[in-house]
Structures are given as structure tokens and as C-alpha cells.
Amino acid sequence: IKERSQKPENDIISQLLQVELDGQKLSEDELLGFCVVLLLAGNETTTNWLSSTILTLAENPDIQERIAKNPEDISLLLEEVLRLRSPAQYLSRIAKQDVELGGQTIKKGGLVSAWLASANRDEIVFPNADRVDLDRKNMDHVAFGHGIHFCLGAPLARVEASVTIKKLLQRIKNIRLQTEDIQLNQSTVTFSIKELPIRFDKV
């Protein structure tokens, strides 16, 4: 940030340094916060979503066959992976006022963690929630949040994931795991795979 404020270049930090609202520029803390959001929400989550999609395909040869015959179903697969293996596991918010929820009182200023991954496997909302089902009638998951907290980057992430998986499946087929022991990164914030050893055939 210090370098770009002295010598701007054609990059996002230089552009953020130029942003003004009502004559005010972003503070250094706001800029740092923006960079963290761009790195995590704009990069890591999509990367994790893609690796989870490959894992889901490797675990489900029948879905691979279906997608090969019906590539338009890639969007259904991607939404089901979002629901099943939400890249962002939870979001935290601070209560603006006292509120009662489910018989519990949440005080103003209290920290609330909404577990998106748990909501996306709610059997009342998603029958057979632990199963991949491309014909699921309800695809109304909360992997991207909800309401005013809905992810601004969701449309871009969906395009990125769709194009990537489509291009990949034009080049490889018969994806299979080399090991059943898939190691996840130790994080409560994201669902992310440490290593994903696979084999595949060329199309």
C-alpha cells in the first residue's frame, strides 16, 4: 500500500487507493481489510470449491457419466457441491440490538456465528442432505450467505467455477481417487482439502 501510494501501477491496490466517497479515501485499515476479503473471499473459497467439485466427481462415477452426456448439468453439480461442502463454513456478525432467537436472548454487541455448512445439511430443508443429488428440488442453500449478507462475488465465482470445470471435463474423464484417506486442512473457517491425489484418463 505504501509503495503504490507513492508509485501507482495498473493493479487493484492502486485503484483502491484512488477510491473516494464523499471526498474521503479509504483508510489504511480499510484498505488492508479489503485486501484480506479479496484474498480469502475472492480467491481461496473458489479454489476450495473447485477442489471439492473434483473430489465429488471422483467419489461419484455415475455423476461423471451424467455430466459427460449432459454438460449443462455442471451448474447443478456446482450448486450441490456448494451446499454439501460449503467453502465458507460460518460467518460471524455482531448483534445490533437485543433479540430473542430460538428461545435464546442475544444481547446487543454479542457475537453471533451462523454455521452455513450446518444449515446446508439441514434434513428438514434438504432431505438426504449428505447425498449428492443433482435432481434436488430445493437448491436454496446459503453457501454464499443470505439477504444483505449475500456474497457480492457470487456471480463471478459461479462463472469462474463453471468455465473451469467445463474446460477440465473436456480434457479429462474417469477421475478417480488414489487414496480414500483425503486430508482436510485443519480450519473451522473453510472447507479445504490439503491434498487431492487423483488419476484420470485423457478425453
Image (cartoon, grey):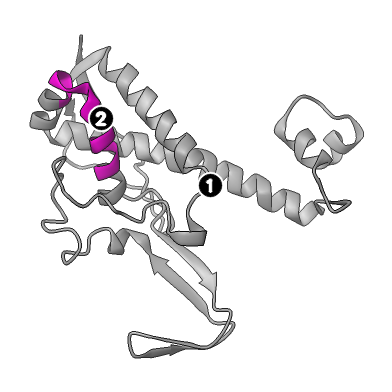
Residue 175 among those drawn in magenta: no
Question: Alpha-carbon distance for marks 2 and 1?
Answer: 22 Å
Please name the residue that numbered disc 1 is placed on.
152
Residue 38, numbered label = none
Say what amino acid the circle numbered 2 marks: Ile
* Quadrant of the rendered image containing residue 189: bottom left
**x 36%, y 40%: residue:** 49
| Circles 2, 1 touching at the beta carbon (< 8 Å) | no
**Is residue 1 at least partly visible in the picture?**
no
**Is residue 173 at least partly visible in the picture?**
yes
In magenta, the rendered stretch is 67-80
Q: Residues within 10 Å of mark 2 (few under 14, many from 20)?
A: many
**x 15%, y 54%: residue:** 130
Left or right, residue 118 beside residue 156: left
Earlier residue among tags 2 and 1 = 2
Left or right, residue 39 beside residue 59: right
Please name the residue that numbered disc 2 is placed on.
74
Q: Quarter holding the C terminus?
A: top left
Q: Residue furthest top?
A: 203
On the image, the x and y values in percent for residue 113 come to 44, 70
Q: Residues within 10 Å of mark 1 (few under 14, many from 20)?
A: few
Say what amino acid the circle numbered 1 marks: Leu
Q: Does residue 187 lie above or below 156 as drawn?
A: below
On the image, the x and y values in percent for residue 116 come to 36, 61
Q: Quarter holding the N terminus?
A: top right
**x 35%, y 34%: residue:** 50
On the image, the x and y values in percent for residue 124 come to 17, 67
Q: Residue furthest left?
A: 62
**x 45%, y 43%: residue:** 45
